[in-house]
Image (cartoon, rainbow, N blue to C red):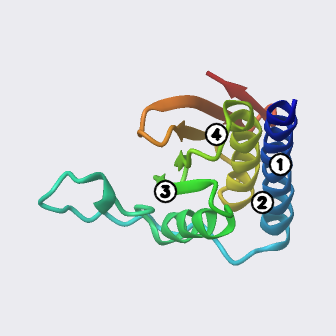
Amino acid sequence: MKQIQFSMIQQLRRILTALVLVLMLTTTVACSGAVQAKQPTLPSVSNSSNYGQIERGNSTGGQDFGNWVISKSKGLIKDAYVRDNNKLGVVVTPQVSPAEVKPLAKSLAQGFHKNFPNQDLTVLMYAPDKKLILTAKYDVQSNQVEYK
């Protein structure tokens, strides 16, 4: 019985953490005008294909947004990158449950749209082992997010 209660409390805590992150990302991005899209720059090329050496963005605005996502995620997002100011990839930590991935992707898509408006956007959600688990596509015309 105690194990079931503990499990339920853990699940509730995870859901509340995801909801707080969604609220925080939406509110902070809506109130922040600091990150602006800029002219893309060429990505740096390294001699190694080591995943850890991928930069957060291939533009200054993308780099700033990727860094901001990591800093505000409260440990839910392990890594993030922005490509061409319309594609955001994030690697979630093991603390993110499968039920939290879709709401987190939606929140990220909304925040991404506020920083890179007037274009269709894609959010790629990766598991901690870096396997793609969800793709969220934001359509600027319909203002809707479609999941694959």
**Left or right side of 101 for 56:** left
What residue appears at the point 41 percent right and 39 percent down from the top-left corner?
129
Amino acid at circle 1? Arg
Please name the residue shown 19% across and 51% down the image.
49
Q: CA distance from mark 3 to mark 1?
A: 22 Å
* Residue 67 at least partly seen: yes
The CA span between labels 4 and 1 is: 33 Å
Q: Is residue 98 left or right of residue 67?
A: right
Per the image, the residue denoted by label 4 is 120
Q: Is residue 89 visible?
A: no
Give SS at disc 4. Answer: loop
Quickly name the residue at label 3.
79
User: Identity of the amino acid at label 2?
Assistant: Leu
Real-space Cα separation, disc 3 to disc 4, in angstroms:
22 Å
Task: State whether residue 17 is above or below residue 45.
Answer: above
Q: Nearer the viewer, residue 121 or 92?
A: 92
Answer with the quarter of the image where residue 25 lies. bottom right
